Amino acid sequence: MCGMTAKERVLEHLPGWSEEQARRALRAVEGWGEEQLQRALQAAEETGATMATHGEQTIGEIDVVAFTEAIDKVEGTGKWPAGTRGTVVSDYGDHKEVEISDADNYGATLDMPVVPVEKLKLISKHS
């Protein structure tokens, strides 16, 4: 980790952070040194602003998620591949109904599978 800038250190953690955490972190580290970065990361963890990879964040309605493995399609045949992104539209506790939309067709709904939470990865927290 030696030789990395504060910004590079923050970028290492971005895949596990919510969109808002990443945005705040990148704005904050401009011009920071290693000591300032370590203090900020420690303070964030102590106050509960932890990275998704360091603790479980509850997935709720309107959160953006990705499938961690292939999921059967409700509409049509086949499976949605791992990595497919969607928005949680209904929360059933340990299962979430996820809307898969077509970004090229004005957000038209393609499918709405109900997926076990252990097969979902939180991409962006909005709930």
Image (cartoon, helix red, strand yellow):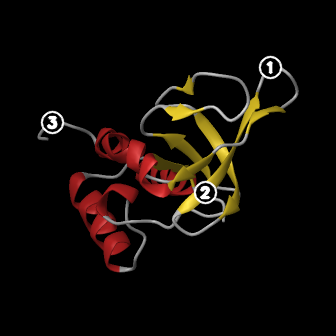
Please provide percent x and percent y for residue 37: 29, 58
For residue 3, the mark is 3
The numbered mark at residue 67 is none
**Image position, residue 63 (x, y; %):** 63, 55
Q: Please state which amino acid type lies under the numbered disc 1.
A: Asp
Q: What is the secondary structure assignment of the residue under circle 1? A: loop
Mark 3 Cα shell of 10 Å, populated few (<14), some (14-19), many (≥20): few
* Residue beneath the point at 52% across and 56% down: 24
Instruction: Name the residue nearer the viewer: 2 or 122.
Output: 122
The label number, if any, that marks residue 104 in the structure image: 1
Which quadrant does the C terminus fall into? Answer: bottom right
Q: Which residue is mark 2?
A: 96
Q: Is residue 23 left or right of residue 68?
A: right
Badge nearest the viewer, 3 or 1: 1
Q: CA distance from mark 3 to mark 1?
A: 42 Å
User: Which residue appears farthest toward the left when viewing the image?
Assistant: 2
Q: Is residue 25 above or below residue 7?
A: below
First in sequence: mark 2 vs mark 1: 2
Three-letter code, disc 3: Gly
Q: Position of residue 82 (x, y in %)?
A: 46, 30
Looking at the rendering, which quadrant does residue 42 occupy? bottom left
Of marks 2 and 3, the one in the foreground: 2
Locate the N terminus and report the quarter of the image it occupies.
top left
